[in-house]
Image (cartoon, helix red, strand yellow):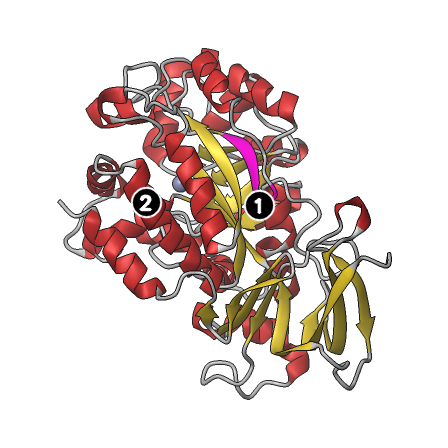
Amino acid sequence: MTPTERTRTYWLEHAWLGTHVEPDVAVTVSVGGSPGGRDGRITAVHQGVTTPPPGAEILRGLTLPGLANAHSHAFHRALRGTVQVGSGTFWTWREVMYSVADRLTPETYLDLARAVYAEMALAGITTVGEFHYVHHAHGGTPYADPNAMGDALIEAAAEAGVRITLLDTCYLSSGFGDPPDPHQLRFSDGTAEAWAERCSVLKDRDHARIGAAIHSVRAVPADQLATVAHWAERRRAPLHVHLSEQTAENDACLRAHGRTPTRLLADHGVLGPRTTGVHNTHLTDEDVALLGDSRTGTCMCPTTERDLADGIGPAAALQRAGSPLSLGSDSHAVVDLLEEARAMELNERLRTRTRGHWTAAALLRAATADGHAALGWDDTGRIEAGARADLATIALDSVRTAGPLPRLGAETAVFAATAADVRHTIVGGRHVVRDGAHTLVPDVPRALARAVEALRA
Ligand SMILES: [Zn+2]
């Protein structure tokens, strides 16, 4: 520590240290004046500190690394409840979703996303991967600032106190080269070249990383896939893609190209360790091998996949093949990464009629370190010296979590706790949620209600 460096100490009643729960852990964080940009990072982790050091912030419960929500469409939060009336499929749900997208402006999107990201912070989420494709004004006319919508999301994350990876999404077609339909004009830059030019203007910030996304093999014609992949490669940025969420997409891809979506992406250089396939639901054995061998990640969104009646993806087989797993709340039917984690395991139990496919520790790694890595934050998601000081504390004394021995805290967090049990959320050494209340957005339910109301037809 230099003479000017200021630190803060947190005393963690219980800490999850990647493999196990440890009691009595002191974590020191640099909060100002550090050399080499270490502000907001953990400088030391001490175990066996049975008495909180003087001046330490006491975090009672189980403290995890901050959670990474690797797949979000913030505006889908406005659909909560309204899409639960009546029947239908993914495709009928999409029509309702488009009607909300039609009404977004940079101003209304800032208000909604700030509230949604605040809801995430209350759920212990410290980094969001925003898969962003509503780029332009009505009819596809660019705003005066062509990145007004993306900048609104980056600003919303700052105001809600969370990190964001803006996965700026290329979306050009209504299906395999057909022109965008009237709703989709707002999403399209016309060509992948024009998409690349627009998002090259976006710059990383302290709390924000710029990544890329291919909406799907439906929405980006095959001859333009490589342009997006090269852009991400040059910037060493994460690249995400919705992959085989629906069998109809697979069928159309086979008709158009004579190969599966995964094979098509492989043939155009899209797969690789900085790429994440989102959903990866309906895959062939060859697809699983292609994703695993290339170390392409898999982001499972189990609460959305069950809400949209998508099916259950082969997450266990993908991980065995070499694909790292992350988790996302996607359509925000609920915002609860603990629920996403347990749903991945419980789905596999229902499918196989056997238990114990992942340990609680493995599920927490998907929700923390591996989720952050999928979003380009390799130094986040661990409680260790050098890592960013992003933490989420789960109460172990609520009606849901009281009872089990503290050493079973990871199992309790994953299999019993909910987002409502998150007591503290700390991002870069700053308390964003204290005792269950957001410190920057005063009344999050009211902010959500007003932002959703503003988008109602
Ligand atoms: Zn999605």
Numbered-mark total: 2
Question: 314 or 306: nearer the eye?
Answer: 306
Badge 1 marks a residue whose secondary structure is loop
Please report the bounds of the magenta region as a residue range. 206-212
Image: 379 above or below 191:
below
Q: Residue at x 49, y 35 (%)?
A: 167
Residue 294: image location, x then y, percent: 66, 31
Q: Quadrant of residue 57?
A: bottom right
Residue 341, label in figure: none
Question: 292 or 111: nearer the eye?
Answer: 111
Which is closer to the viewer, label 2 or label 1? 1
Three-letter code for the amino acid on which mark 2 is drawn: Phe
Residue 207, label in figure: 1
Image: 107 above or below 57:
above
Question: 182 or 194: nearer the eye?
Answer: 194
- CA gap between label 2 and label 1 equals 20 Å
Q: In screen coordinates, is 44 left or right of 114?
A: right
Badge 2 marks a residue whose secondary structure is helix
Image: 189 above or below 46:
above
Q: In screen coordinates, is 211 left or right of 333?
A: right
Residue 25: image location, x then y, percent: 75, 75
Residue for badge 2? 75
Three-letter code for the amino acid on which mark 1 is drawn: His
Q: Crowdedness of circle 2 by 10 Å Cα count: few (<14), some, many (20+)? A: many
First-in-chain label (2 vs 1): 2
Q: What kind of secondary structure does the magenta stretch mostly adopt?
A: strand
Image quadrant holding the N terminus, namely: bottom right
Q: Is mark 1 within 8 Å of ligand 1?
A: no
Q: Residue at x 24, y 52 (%)?
A: 452
Q: Residue at x 46, y 25 (%)?
A: 260
Image quadrant holding the C terminus, namely: top left
